[in-house]
Image: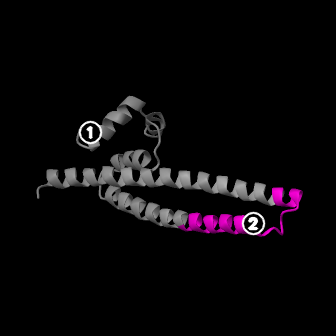
Amino acid sequence: MNNKSKKLLNMTNLLEYSTRLHLLLSEAKQLNEDMTELRDKITYFGASSVLHGTKNNATGRDRFADFMVDVENLESTMLENIHKIIRERQKLERAIGKIDDDEARLLLRLRLINGLSWEKIGNTLNTDRTNASRKFRKILGG
């Protein structure tokens, strides 16, 4: 395999790892929102039970136990998601680390890992957003 083919393969891997990482991060955000909603329900349920005297009601205990099982299951899913995020980020970091050019590595890291806007990347690289975007496309071979 020649250098150009290796470079193209590496860039393809970068984009795949980046896409997976950002999908996992989006999933983590949604899981966090789900957890917040579930905890709000538990808080409401607990306050409602106290106000309405249903704390010792068997149905109330069952509902509370169901909520706690849901929390436990969601926490488990969140933990699995975190492990996947760590693995994907490590893959992406290793792929970026193989690039010799310091500015290219920084540019890729800022965009693919940190998800910064072109304007922020341009500011970091002391250039404008358009040049930052062009450099990125050039690095990826396009």
Residue under the point 55% across and 68% down: 76
Q: Which residue is drawn at 32% across and 49% down?
A: 15
SS under mark 1? helix
What secondary structure is the magenta-colored segment mainly?
Answer: helix
On the question of residue 128 being in view, the answer is no
Magenta run includes residue 55:
yes
The three-letter amino acid code for the residue at tag 2 is Thr
Mark 1 burial class by Cα count in 10 Å: few <14, some 14-19, many 20+: few
Residue occupying the point 87% across, 60% down: 50
Label 1 with label 2: CB-CB less than 8 Å: no
Tell me the CA gap for discs 1 and 2. 63 Å
**Residue 119, visible in the rendered structure:** yes
- Where's residue 9, x and y in %? 21, 54
Residue 44 drawn in magenta = no
Is residue 129 shown above or below 116? above
> Is residue 127 toward the left or the right of residue 4 in the image?
right
Residue marked by disc 1 = 138
Labels 1 and 2: the sequence-earlier one: 2
Q: Quadrant of the N terminus?
A: bottom left
Residue 64 located left or right of residue 10: right
- 50 or 30, nearer to the observer: 50
Q: In this view, does 8 lie to the left or right of 16?
A: left
Callout 2 secondary element: helix
Q: In which quarter of the image is the C terminus?
A: top left
In the rendered image, residue 11, in percent from the top left (x then y), is placed at 26, 50
User: To which residue does mark 2 refer?
Assistant: 59
- Classed neighbour count for the residue bearing mark 2: other residues with Cα under 10 Å, few (<14), some (14–19), many (≥20): few
Identify the residue at the far left of this view. 1
For the record, the magenta segment spans 48-76
Q: Nearer the viewer, mark 1 or mark 2?
A: 2
- In this view, the residue in front, 132 or 53, is 53
